[in-house]
Image: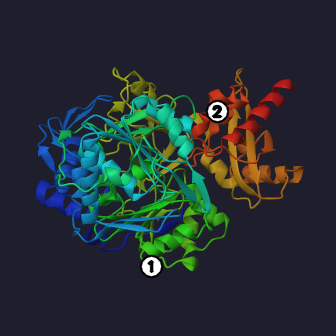
Amino acid sequence: MGDMLWTPPADVRERSRIGGYLRWLREHRGLDFADYDALWRWSTTDLDGFWRSIWDHFEVVAHTPPAATLAERGMPGARWFPGATLNYAENVLRMPGRADDDPVVIAHGQTRAPVTLTAGELREQVRRVSAGLRRLGVSAGDRVAAYAPNIGETYVLLLATASLGAIFSSCAPEFGTRSVTDRWQQIEPTVLVAVDGYRYGDKAVDRRAEVAAIRAALPSLRHTVSIGYLDPTGSAPEDALGWEDLAAPTDEPLTFTPVPFDHPLYVLYSSGTTGLPKPIVHGHGGILLEHLKMLALHHDLGPADRFFWFTTTGWMMWNFLVSGPAVGATIVLFDGNPAHPDLGGLWRLAAETGTTYFGTSAPFLLACRKAALVPREVADLSALRGVGSTGAPLPAEGFHWVYETVSDRVQLQSLSGGTDVCTGFVGGVPLLPVYAGEIACRALGAKVEARSADGTPVLGELGELVITEPMPSMPVGFWNDPDGVRYSEAYFDVYPGVWRHGDWITINGRGGCVITGRSDATLNRGGVRLGTAEFYSVVEGLDEVLDSVVVHLEDDEGGAGELLLFVVLAEGLELDDPMRAAICRELRTALSPRHVPDEIHQVRAVPRTLSAKKLEVPVKKILTGTPVDQAAAKGALANPESLNAFAALAQSRATT
């Protein structure tokens, strides 16, 4: 059991938003819950009662009321709030608890000076851009694509697009041309809004050639709008509009097109490490309800908060972050290199912006730890009360580092979920303590279970993460999948009627969760399933090892197979036999003899997606003979050249 590192204050029910929700349930529903576990059990059994309470408690603005809460309960195919019409943008721009002159968007980056938008300015910009899109012929159901970073314009464009009932899709400008066209050729946008380039640290990155190639590959485009981000004095391409044209002054009022609850809001994409990225369609109502629930009740965000998450527009955490104003929170946007000029940069940004909730990835926190950074010594973090971590499992030593070097007062919330639901379905909550290495709970309304190989639910042991009841933010479907075949295959092919997510999870007796990596990257040695997360925790705990990736190559004849470990070593170090022995000794001692690799190889880099996820499955495919181009979509990788080392090893292994 992990050490308890934080406990809720005695008056947590008086001070937190979930405490206010519990009082509301008692007053308006006659429901009383002794603890979080009782509340969670109700939320995952009385789906009608729970999700209707979220709708009512947060006073969702609807144009027509729902005829029911949940018309069809089966998965796939659950039908939520039939008959209701609403608009996501209208509910976000309500910004409860905020006055017109309150700052609600604070945008920093390495390309231009900081920009702040007040509530009034945000509404005004959305009004103008909404009118500009309408002038370009955009209406409900059309797709608007943004090749743009985490800046105010991208956010305004999302809200303006949603206000019309049109459908938004973004790709971060570090995505290569092929990655972008693999995504957008599927959805056929009519309008493209793109930056001319950006700065990453002190390096200028010109993207005009990529924008031209993207335009040439998308015959559906009717209009292109250029944002002069890298060079504000430069002119837009001759046949493109400028952002100032799109956002030109107008008398048109800001209106919101009422759309059905499950009307498409935006299309997100699976990381696309193999094959075409899955175009995951999310709906207005499901995203709104899920984000109201998570941001207010789990992250405890409200009008007094400044909410930051380090993300790009190519990761679902951006979509999660920018729902912040729906609960009254100010959002802090950042575009640039998080390690420039050093790893203290984001912590200093938190101090400068008065951030109260600092969200990032587990790899970033572990990199700070590895660099022996003490954030509280480089920045005044007195306003901080929450730290969020996602993107990969955060091991116990990451938890200890936060409490030792950031603050012993913050609530550290490790969460896990996915692009598929655009949220975390396991995470933290103000009512529960924080234990090292452990995700505190299953989120309200998320019926998460662990399943053994034969499909039976298990407690206290490793199992497949499944969701056994529908959630409103499950995808409306996949784009261009009219009969739902691709959608069903993605989540429901293993356990009919049950969502299989593809992660390994252990749920303990108190409801705490530990995720140990992707189930499709399992290390299965002698019949024992081993998660990759604990493996990395040990290997990367060694000072000499900067990064690592491990794969298990099964034996077709049922033998133990081969466990191969690849390490990136600190500068100037070479992998030799004493270091191999030290790594093996550490794994044997910390984990088990089964974890000792058959071979250890030194590589220059571990392949990662643009959102920093390790690519165990493509590496495994390459090592078993799949050509590099078929094993991974290179444009979705932060470092595609890193795959070459594995291809070379596969070739040498095949000839020996």
- The answer to whether residue 34 of the structure is visible from this angle is no
Position in image of residue 138 (x %, y %): 28, 38
Image quadrant containing the N terminus: bottom right
Above or below, 248 against 638 in this view is below
Residue 526 falls left or right of residue 61 = right
> Exactly how many numbered labels are in the figure?
2
Packing grade of label 2 (10 A; few <14, some 14-19, many >=20) is few
Please give the name of the residue rendered at 56% of the width and 34% of the height, measured from the top-left corner.
Answer: 178
- The spot of residue 607 in percent (x, y) is 66, 43
Q: Residues within 10 Å of mark 1 (few under 14, many from 20)?
A: some
Q: Nearer the viewer, residue 524 or 115?
A: 115
Q: Earlier in the sequence, mark 1 or mark 2?
A: 1
Q: Position of residue 45 (x, y in %)?
A: 26, 42
Q: Are marks 1 and 2 in contact (CB under 8 Å)?
A: no
Instruction: Using the image, tell me which numbered label, if any, was put on residue 382.
Output: 1
Identified by mark 1, the residue type is: Ser
- Rendering quarter of residue 78: top left
Q: CA distance from mark 1 to mark 2?
A: 49 Å
Q: Which residue is mark 2?
A: 527
Residue 449 % position (x, y): 41, 41
Q: Residue at x 30, y 71 (%)?
A: 304
